[in-house]
Amino acid sequence: MFEVDIDRLDEQMPDIIAELLTGPGAVVIRKAFTDEQVAAARDYIITESDGEAERETHFHGANEDKVHLQRRVWNLLNKGEVFEAMVQHPAVAKIASVFLGDKFILGSIAANRLLPGGPGQEPHIDYPYWDLYEREGFPTAINSSFPLNLQATIPLDPFNATSGASAFLAGSQGELLYPDKGDRDRFFAEADRMAGDPGDCIIFNGMVWHCAMPNNSDHDRTAVLIEYLAKFVTPLEDQKSGVRQEVIDRGTPLLHQLMSLTYPYPKLFDEAEAAVAIGRDAVKQK
Ligand SMILES: O=C(O)CCC(=O)C(=O)O
Ligand SMILES: [Fe+2]
């Protein structure tokens, strides 16, 4: 995977965007988060997922007997300041603002914990294309020429071939397709791994075919999964209802943007102030 050097981010940006859009589809920032941040996030997720009932999950249709060895913790934006920091990493935010437009939003921040023996997933693509196998639900001629989604995976445990580091098929974002069952042999034969250490941040195009792999190690394999979206895409998680007011009150302008608090639609135009709000000339008046 292409390594992002945060001290040379502006210089690298065209290459990063090309890697994500038309190259292999994934880049990595090594040591994006500190050991303290990793420990705080991990402690919370382990405690929460030890005690709680099973949560909704996805892409595990073939492994229902092992699904108890896979744990999800959802809505992490409401679960501690470390997660507020994780969604606002300055270099990731800069890459997202170029890739998705500078009013990009948060679609989801959740954890995926695979216990030893935990199952992998089916190869898939991420939201908002994640039900693309129901092709009739999408616009005609939808294609991969521009992205609506950017994913960030933050390993909290060693991510390697044994522990079930996510697999991805380099370049598979080029045709916007949900992998067929018949594509799986090629996927598993040719896929690379999103290998990394706790605190790294792997950023990838959500159109890339990928999946969690089985955890054959003797330790947990936990990651924080963040989904960023273009401003007009409906987020996966309902942060407006799910996040406490105190998180909003202490939130930065970026956090408010991520929660869609600054995006005005849908809007009740009958109740809006009488003004010309949209158009090149309206912008000039501001
Ligand atoms: O946990 C992983 O390795 C990947 C999870 C994933 O791709 C997903 O849940 O959409
Ligand atoms: Fe995924």
Image: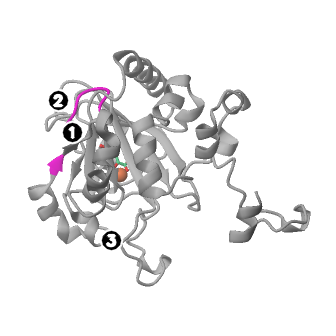
Indicate which disc residue 245 carries: none
Q: Residue placed at 29% from the left, 31% from the top?
A: 200
- Pointer 2 residue: 217
In the rendered image, residue 33, in percent from the top left (x then y), is placed at 36, 25
**Residues marked 2 and 1 touching at CB (< 8 Å):** yes
- Pointer 3 residue: 176
In the rendered image, residue 244, in percent from the top left (x then y), is placed at 69, 32
Kindly identify the amino acid type of the residue bearing the numbered disc 3: Leu
Q: Please, which residue is most extreme toward the top here?
A: 36
- Badge 1 residue CB within 8 Å of ligand 1: yes
| Bounds of the magenta segment | 192-200
- Pointer 1 residue: 164
- Left or right of 57? Residue 192 is left
- Left or right of 52? Residue 141 is left
Label 2 residue SS: loop
In the rendered image, residue 28, in percent from the top left (x then y), is placed at 26, 40
Kindly identify the amino acid type of the residue bearing the numbered disc 2: Ser
- Left or right of 213? Residue 69 is right
Q: Residue placed at 69% from the left, 47% from the top?
A: 261
